[in-house]
Image (spheres, coloured by chain):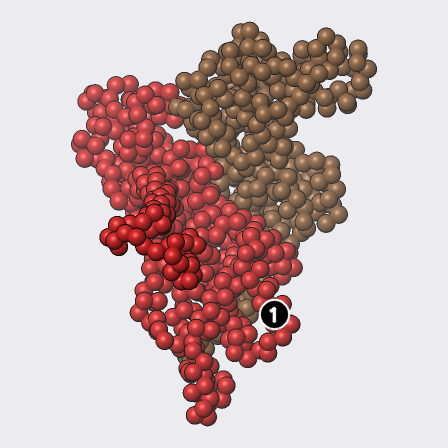
Chain colours: A brown, B red
Amino acid sequence: MKATNLIALAAAGIVAAATGAQARDQVAVAGSSTVLPYASIVAEAFGENFDFPTPVVESGGSSAGLKKFCEGVGEATIDIANASRAIREKEIKACAENGVTEIIEVRIGYDGIVFASQTDGPAFTAFTPDQWYHALAAKQIVDGELVDNPNMKWSDVDPSLPDVEIAAFIPGTKHGTREVFEEKVILAGCEESGAMAKMTGDLGMSEDDAEDACMEVRADGKSVDIDGDYTETLSRIDANSNGIGVFGLAFYENNTDKLKVATMSGVVPSTESISTGEYPVSRPLFFYVKKAHIGVVPGLKEFASFFVSDAVAGPSGPLAQYGLVADPELADTQAAIAAEDVMN
Amino acid sequence: MTDAAMPPAAAAGPSRKPKKSLHVLDDNTRRRNGAERRFRILGGCAVGTGVLALVVLLISILSAGLPSFQQTFLKAEIYLDPAVLDPSGERDPEAISKILTFSYSPMIKGSLTALAEELEAQGAENLTPKMLADMVSGAANAKLRDYVIANPDEIGKTVEFEFLTNARIDQYLKGKVTRESAALDSRVDVAQLNAADELVASGAMEKRFNWDFITAPDASENRPEAAGLGVALLGSLYMMLIVLCLALPIGVAASIYLEEFARKNFLTDVIEVNISNLAAVPSIVFGILGLAIFINMMHLPNSAPIVGGLVLTLMTLPTIIIATRASLKAVPPSIRDAALGVGASKMQAVFHHVLPLAAPGILTGTILGLAQALGETAPLLLIGMVAFVRDYPDAPPGGLFEPATGLPVQVYNFTQRADPAFVERASGAIIVLLVFLVIMNLVAIILRRRFERRW
């Protein structure tokens, strides 16, 4: 029976050890899957260069990360939330209710959203937001009336586009990227084409209703929501030569041998055109730091300032090499972290 | 097939009297033989489909994953420039460690300039020193820095190092990157491929077996070539230890009690139904449970093997209980009766006689339960084990509370990454996982064959 006793002893040991929680000595990060690659690159370099342990970076999406972030203060909660969008009022409130009142907002740079298709596929080389609105919106104005989108082929939208079925693979609603896509492409196209003005004018809709009607994406199978990562979008494009997908610039730059990118309103997406603001579809990336944890979790402030240091987030740093568009106002962000400026 | 079971009275009736010799098949027999033949063919097809699916799976995984066990290395001489590494000249370890890895990149580039010119002269057209330096993995900086901090006296000397090459060059030597794809690829230049050919010819660059894939921790997206499974393997090992130490004693104790001591009444029936039910509950449910109880209520740390182990224990318990009860049931009652007959107490009868005879079955069930737990991903998603973790956890028990990942979640992790080189590593991780599963199942079969008793 010796073996059984030994196992029982070990089991008792584990249970006993489980009751006493341990102090955390590494920074815990969670959130956006768009920011994840950048955060892991910085975490790796941070672990290599400093005596602090390498931070642990979890994925899961901006909303999930911020929710975890707002669960409270203490070692069981995370220190940093990554987000591919700014924190919402609702989330700040939820944070405050749980005692997370002091939040430092850090903008790490910008990310472009690009439209890409198979290299050997049809010639999707130039788009405008207007075309995307007409291809993907659920309702269109035909003869002064709002009807289901009649466009089946890209050439129906615009004769200059290839004569192939519309097959768009766009990020699912749980992604922060979807929000940017709807606002900066679909809604912009709706306004550009004058459809928005018609809705509020001739059709007598309120501004909010018109916006919602503009941004509603068709659900008849021409547009497919991808809830997974860009790798899933890529494999869908691989399988469908007429498919066109929405990607992050960094992902595209890592896969230029398989994807060809289209211009938006005549501008080629690149780190340069995004940093100058010429390329229209881009968004800032953030992370949020819990000020109450600075000084409690070793290395937290050092990690935050290392993240936005010139050597890391600057135009020639490893983040830019991966595809981040460096923030021209990086110096302000560095100063804000040094002073531990919290959001209002 | 009712014909075969025809009652003898009917068969012996005058109308069914065999008119021909037994050597000639009558219609009835022919029909029955035909049915059997068709069943055999269908059965063969069924097995064939299964085997075919397995073969296709294995071939695709092996062909995609085996190259990940090999990696390309480049030998290069690096001048450890004192002006960069130790501007004060005092060889003060503190000052040297203040020089960050980023400062090492220009030094590597500088040291490779001569080599780049030489290669360009040999036929690698348009090769710049920067291109050559870019062929070296980003992990090289950290390797150099660690070396310099450990050997400050070497500053100012030229030292030969062996670095990983970047993933694109590695993929080129493995045939996945071609000149056509490189021409389109913004991450690699055809000149670099030419240089790689020259370096391979001169012996400075070679592809060989890479233990680091198994032992090294994960790496970030900029350096897929350095990513390994070390932390994931350790995390999986810790979780399996916890499952073994908790699920085996609890499961065996529960089944002995239920099988040998508990009275058969409504309550035990309810428990029995619930155990069978639990065995069929989707594993993600255990993850939700683990998140609610172990992390939110007991405040155990996120991403820690202890939580993963506890969740997997809950998941494995029903499997172990069912297997143990079955093997306890298989021990004939005569053994118990004999033990009780010579005066053993009930407990002595169970522990001295029944349990040892049931042990092979229990072990087999346990190992199969462990194998199932090893491959489980869904519950780990919820308790934060799908994370980027680079520090190895300490030895148990302390290490059980430190962040780690597991093999299956590492596979999931690799498949999410942008760089195509991670596809190969995901398949490599699957191979490692499969090897462990095959070993565990083999052990289970061997145990069963060697110790199995028949009555």
Question: Which residue, as the protein is rendered here, is positioned at the far front?
Answer: B14
Examine the rendering and report whether any part of residue A52 can be seen. Answer: no
Q: Residues within 10 Å of mark 1 (few under 14, many from 20)?
A: few
Report x, y in % for residue B16. 37, 54
Q: Quadrant of residue B183?
A: top left
Report x, y in % for residue B225. 36, 39
Front-most of residues A46 and B86: A46
* Residue at 22% from the left image edge and 25% from the top image edge: B119
Q: Tally the marks.
A: 1
Q: Quadrant of residue A264?
A: top right
* Residue at 63% from the left image edge and 59% from the top image edge: B293
Q: Is residue A37 above or below residue B312?
A: above
Front-most of residues B157 and B176: B176
Q: Is residue A195 above or below residue B239?
A: above
Reading the image, the residue beneath label 1 is: B269
Q: Is residue B386 above or below residue B137?
A: below
**Amino acid type shown at disc 1:** Asp
